[in-house]
Image: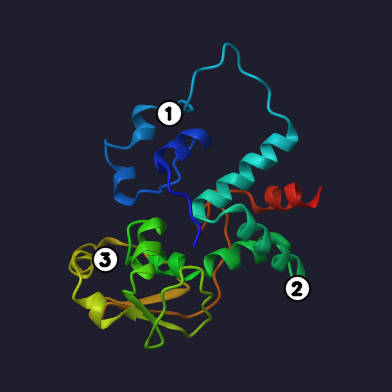
Amino acid sequence: MARYTGPVCRLCRRHGDKLFLKGDRCFSPKCSFERRPNPPGPRPARRRKISDRGLQLREKQRARVTYGVLEKQFRRYYEEAIRRPGVTGENLVRLLELRLDNIVYRMGFADSRNQARQIVRHGLISVNGRKVDIPSARLNPGDMIAFTPRGTRSEHYKYTQEVAKSKNPPSWVSVDLSNMSGRMVSPPEVAQGETHNFNENVVIEYYSR
């Protein structure tokens, strides 16, 4: 399964904003973006004006990097969002939020989406009592997410028990910390600035040209 394997702090610097790709490290003084907020590579002699198309591309890349999705898969999400009734931009965000790795992250069982993807791939997460090791698996309201028997014996489970209390899951998921499980109670709510850090309408404009 293809994924980006390069330095993720470089992506934050490229987009000129914190994307919180490394979890708690992004809130600490060790954050690379805090120390070097300038884009990677040699500094240009003069700043070039970015075209409208360039701004759309940058917003699309920001959305793709945030959820850890490569271009081919991201375009499939866009094409499905078009086919669904309703606002295309909101449909796109909901499809991304319904990914298993994202919901594991939203429930506080991982510090970042990259970490959530890893524990899913390692077989530590179950959905409705069955192990699921596909990070892009799409969940539905009512689905129950928990740790597998192997997951409860892992070091990550012990760590999560200690830090999950400080997490603030969104209203569309419920978390039972005593059993270290959670349930998706409703479709994801779409509100820019609260659930995602990009403008979905600009992303749609990029693909619509």
Per the image, the residue denoted by label 1 is 37
The residue shown at (35%, 59%) is: 115
- Tags 2 and 1 touching, CB below 8 Å: no
Secondary structure beneath label 2: loop
The residue shown at (37%, 88%) is: 129
Q: Nearer the viewer, residue 134 or 81?
A: 134
Secondary structure beneath label 1: loop
Could you say which disc has been placed on residue 164 in the image?
Answer: 3
Could you say which disc has been placed on residue 85 in the image?
Answer: 2
Q: Residues within 10 Å of mark 2 (few under 14, many from 20)?
A: few
* Above-or-below relation of 43 to 74: above
Q: Nearer the viewer, residue 106 or 3?
A: 3
C-alpha span from label 1 to label 3: 30 Å
In the displayed orientation, state which residue is furthest to the top: 45
Q: Amino acid at mark 3?
A: Ala
Q: Amino acid at mark 1?
A: Pro
Q: Amino acid at mark 2?
A: Pro
Percent from the top left, x then y, of residue 170?
Answer: 44, 67
Q: Residues within 10 Å of mark 3 (few under 14, many from 20)?
A: some
The residue shown at (62%, 40%) is: 58
Percent from the top left, x then y, of residue 134?
Answer: 46, 72
Question: Viewed as shown, does residue 165 lie left or right of 188?
Answer: left
Mark 1 vs mark 3: in front: 1
Q: Earlier in the sequence, mark 2 or mark 1?
A: 1
Could you say which disc has been placed on residue 74 in the image?
Answer: none
